[in-house]
Structure formats: C-alpha cells, structure tokens
Amino acid sequence: MKILVNRLLVPTLSGDGKQKKPHYIAYTDWGNRQNSHIVICVHGLTRNCRDFDYLARAMQSDCRVISVDVVGRGQSDWLEHAHDYDYYPLYLSDAMLLVAHIQTQYHTKITLDWVGVSMGGLIGMMLAIQPNPPFIINKLIMSDIGPLIPAAALNRIADYVGKDPRFSSFEEFKQYMKVISVSFGPLTEDQWNHMAVHSAREFADGSYGFRYDPRIATSFKDRKIKDIDLWEQWDKLNRPPLVLRGMESDVLTAETAAQMQVRGAKARIVDLPGIGHAPMLMDDNQIKIVRDYILE
C-alpha cells in the first residue's frame, strides 16, 4: 500500500507570548482511511516519523497508523526562534491539533491509541492527563521512557545533540549514526540503512548531516542539566500504559520501572535484553508486543 505523506499547518505556541508564524508538521498515513481505529506514533528527540514504517506496515491491515514528524524534525518545519523548542505546550498543541484534524475526517468518534518512543512517549503521557480532554487515549505505549530521567542520561544525550556534524559521504554519515545510536540494540543492516536514509540531509556542497534542526538542543544549553522528575504527572494517569524498557537503558532505570508498576495507573513493563535507549519497534518481537497489546 502506498504511503501517504501529508502536512498540517498549525499555530506556533510560544512561552514569550509573542505571535509567531505558523508551522507545518508532516505525517505519514498508513492503512484504510475509513478505519476509525487510529494509532498515532511519535518518535524520540532527534528521530523522525519514518522510524515507524516497520510497525505501521505490520499494523495497517487492522488500524490506520499516523506517524508524525515533531516540529524541527524530519519533514516538518523548523521554528524561527530556537527558544520555542523548549516550550513543551507547543508539542502538546501540535499533537492535539493533529488528532482534531484526523477526527474531522470521521462522522463517529475515533478510537485512539498512542505509541511513543522516548520523547514521543512523554508527549503521550502529558496528553493523557489533560483536564477535560477533547479525546481519550485508549491505549498508551511508551518505549523506554518514564517519569524520572536521570541527569547522567541527559548529559550523555547533550554530548551529541545539536552539534551538527558534516560528513563527506552518506556512508560516513550512516556509520556515525550507528555509533551514537548503538544503544538502539541489534538492528539489521537494512534497518540501519532505512534509518540513515530518512535521517540524512544532503547539502549543496555534497556533504551530509542530520535532518533535524540542531537548535532543538536549546534546553540542554540554556539551563543546568538535572534530573527530570514527572512523578506528579505520572500519578495522574488513570489507564495502565505498556512500557517497553531496554534492560541496558540509562534513561529508564530498573528502579524507576519498578516504581512505575506500583504507582499511578500501574504500568505493564516489558524488559528487553541487549537493548539500551531506546527500543525502536522495528524488529518482529517488539512489533508483536505492541501489536498484540493494541489489538487484544
């Protein structure tokens, strides 16, 4: 089935209260557009919507799968002002407007599930606890993210995010991406190539770099890095999420995962050996776990 790639124009929320020009967010659209069972997939900090092609291909006969490029990533627009990347209500607004846009295509209420890797999981969690929401997230799947993110992990990420390196060839770019992404776990060469193709940007001089806006690293540069504590938000969840955890992860520790099973909505945790941050939902086992949970 042909992949449809769409763009939606949305307003740019800003923490400084100033009016900013709107931006486009891009998304892929898999499956039957008449199917009102919608699965929205959102990637991690520096990734893009094409990470979900493998999952979407496996799900499209049962659900309509929408995978979005978060602003500043993939095919979505870059923001005019770097500090706006550090304003989290912008991400919630974009997500809510995308869901509202999809809902307008149906005469009945859609059934909405949310699959988020890392940052995408946090966006889903925050949406799920909004007061008087215009929609309900039926099932929330979070890959290797939780309500406590250690400063040590954030410092590791800050070491490479936003540095905007350039490479003389696509192959050099891919090899560098594999090095900084080794914690994704064992992926096939085809999967690495797929990720590299959709992560790379070719410049006029023939060099290659990352497609995301390096200014997304603003939050790492403008403040002291410390633990991110979202337990208060986690405790507001009223439906148990499915959480996939890389057993070698420094972002979602075993201690935090254990607390997630007894606090709030009490998550269902699936530990995945040989993987750090984060399971990318590309291999057959991870896809089966997610698919079974959504369709059970």
Image (cartoon, rainbow, N blue to C red):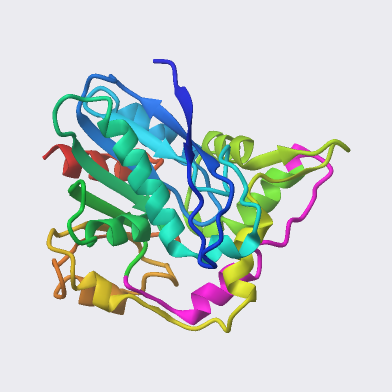
Above or below residue 161? Residue 199 is: above
Q: Residue at x 18, y 44 (%)?
A: 293
Name the foreground residue: 61 vs 238: 238
Seen from this angle, which residue lies furthest right? 205
Residue 158 in view, yes or no: yes
Above or below residue 70? Residue 13 is: below
**Quadrant of the rendered image containing residue 208:** top right
Q: Verify whether residue 109 appears in magenta.
A: no
Expressed as whole percent of the image width and height from the top left, the position of residue 75 reads 58, 37
Q: Residue at x 54, y 67 (%)?
A: 16
Q: In this image, 67 relative to 170: left or right?
A: left
Expressed as whole percent of the image width and height from the top left, the position of residue 188 reads 51, 39
Name the foreground residue: 85 vs 32: 85
Q: Residue at x 17, y 24 (%)?
A: 107
* Image quadrant in which the N terminus is located: top left
Q: How many marks?
A: 0
Q: Verify whether residue 150 appears in magenta.
A: yes
**Quadrant of the rendered image containing residue 77:** top right
Q: In this image, 47 relative to 235: left or right?
A: right
* Image quadrant in which the C terminus is located: top left
Question: Magenta residues, as a range?
Answer: 147-171
Residue 275 in view, yes or no: no
Q: Residue at x 59, y 47 (%)?
A: 21
Expressed as whole percent of the image width and height from the top left, the position of residue 294 reads 19, 41
Expressed as whole percent of the image width and height from the top left, the position of residue 28 reads 44, 30
Name the foreground residue: 241 vs 230: 230
